[in-house]
C-alpha cells in the first residue's frame, strides 16, 4: 500500500525558511515524478513544484520560483521542499503527491498534508 | 499557463440525484484528471486521462470530454459523495494547474 507521510510544517517567520519532508513507501520511489501541492485556508488546490524520478529535473509555479527548492533522495525514498523567503501567502497545507509513471504532473496518490503557517 | 474554470461553484443536490460538473480550459489540454477532496483528508484521484476511472472508484463516477471541455458525472449521489471536486490538467508543459473546485452539497 502506498503511503506518503509529510513532516516539517509549523510556524515560519516572514522572510524565514522551513524544510518539508515526505517519506514514501509502498512503491518504487525512483520510478515516479513527485510533486508538492498546497491549499491555502479557504482556497482551492495549487500545484507548487514537480521533480522527475529519473534525471531530477524540476519545475515550479511562478508564485514560488526562486524561493522554493524541490529535491529528492531516492536512496531514502524521501521528497523535500526547501522553502525560503517565506511570505504570509505561503500559509497553507502542503501535500506530497505521487505522479503516474506514464505521464507526469497528475497525482495518483496524495499525502494527508502538513500545515505551514507564516506569521510574525 | 492554462487556466481551468469549473462550474458551477456549488451544486446543491439530494442523495440519489445526478450531478454534472464542468471544467473548461483556456486552451487545449493534453490530459485531465478529477479529484475528490473532503475536509481534513487527502484528496483522492477519481478520473485520469479525462475518462478512465482510477482503481477502486465506483462506476457511478464517469468522466468525458476532450480539448477544452470536460465533464464529471456522478450518476446517483451517495451520502459519501458530498465533497469538493477539482479538475487538473497535466502531461504537457508545467504548471499543472487545477480548477477552483466545485462543492457538491446536500440540498
Image (spheres, grey):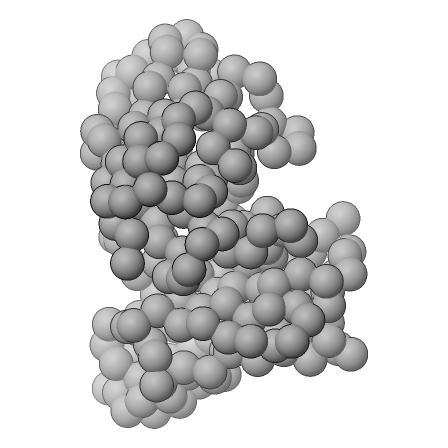
Judge left or right: residue A99 versus residue B99: right
**Closer to us: B25 or B7:** B25
Judge left or right: residue A14 versus residue A36: left
Residue at x 61% of width, y 33% of height: B54
Residue B7 appears in view: yes
Q: Position of residue A19 (x, y in %)?
A: 50, 83
**Closer to us: A111 or A48:** A48
Residue at x 44% of width, y 12% of height: B75
Q: How many marks?
A: 0
**Closer to us: A117 or A43:** A43
Q: Position of residue B98 (x, y in %)?
A: 35, 49
Q: Position of residue A79 (x, y in %)?
A: 61, 73
Residue at x 35% of width, y 85% of height: A67
Q: Position of residue B100 (x, y in %)?
A: 27, 45
Q: Is residue A38 shown above or below A81?
A: above
Residue at x 36% of width, y 9% of height: B17
Judge left or right: residue B6 versus residue A37: left
Residue B37 appears in view: no
Residue B88 figure quarter: top left
Residue A38 figure quarter: bottom left
Q: Is residue B20 shown above or below B25?
A: above
Q: Pick the quarter of the image with the C terminus of chain A.
A: bottom left
Residue B92 figure quarter: bottom left
Judge left or right: residue A34 versus residue B6: right
Q: Is residue B16 shown above or below B105?
A: above
Amino acid at each position: 500500500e502506498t503511503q506518503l507521510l509529510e513532516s516539517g510544517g509549523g510556524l515560519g517567520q516572514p522572510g524565514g525558511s522551513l524544510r518539508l519532508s515526505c517519506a514514501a513507501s509502498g512503491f518504487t520511489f525512483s520510478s515516479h515524478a513527485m510533486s508538492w501541492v498546497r491549499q491555502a485556508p479557504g482556497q482551492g488546490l495549487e500545484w507548487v513544484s514537480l521533480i522527475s524520478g529519473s534525471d531530477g529535473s524540476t519545475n515550479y509555479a511562478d508564485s514560488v520560483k526562486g524561493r522554493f527548492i524541490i529535491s529528492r533522495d531516492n536512496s531514502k525514498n524521501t521528497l523535500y521542499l526547501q522553502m525560503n523567503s517565506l511570505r504570509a501567502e505561503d500559509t497553507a497545507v502542503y501535500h506530497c503527491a505521487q505522479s503516474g509513471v506514464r505521464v507526469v504532473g497528475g497525482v495518483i496518490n496524495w499525502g494527508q498534508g502538513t500545515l505551514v503557517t507564516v506569521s510574525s | 499557463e492554462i487556466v481551468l474554470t469549473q462550474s458551477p461553484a456549488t451544486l446543491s443536490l439530494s442523495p440519489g440525484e445526478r450531478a454534472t460538473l464542468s471544467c473548461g480550459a483556456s486552451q487545449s489540454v493534453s490530459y485531465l484528471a478529477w479529484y475528490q477532496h473532503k475536509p481534513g483528508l487527502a484528496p483522492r484521484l477519481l478520473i485520469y486521462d479525462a475518462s478512465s476511472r482510477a482503481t477502486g472508484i465506483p462506476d457511478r463516477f464517469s468522466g468525458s470530454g476532450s480539448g477544452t471541455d470536460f465533464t464529471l458525472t456522478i450518476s446517483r449521489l451517495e451520502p459519501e459523495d458530498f465533497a469538493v471536486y477539482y479538475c487538473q490538467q497535466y502531461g504537457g508543459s508545467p504548471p499543472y494547474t487545477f480548477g477552483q473546485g466545485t462543492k457538491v452539497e446536500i440540498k
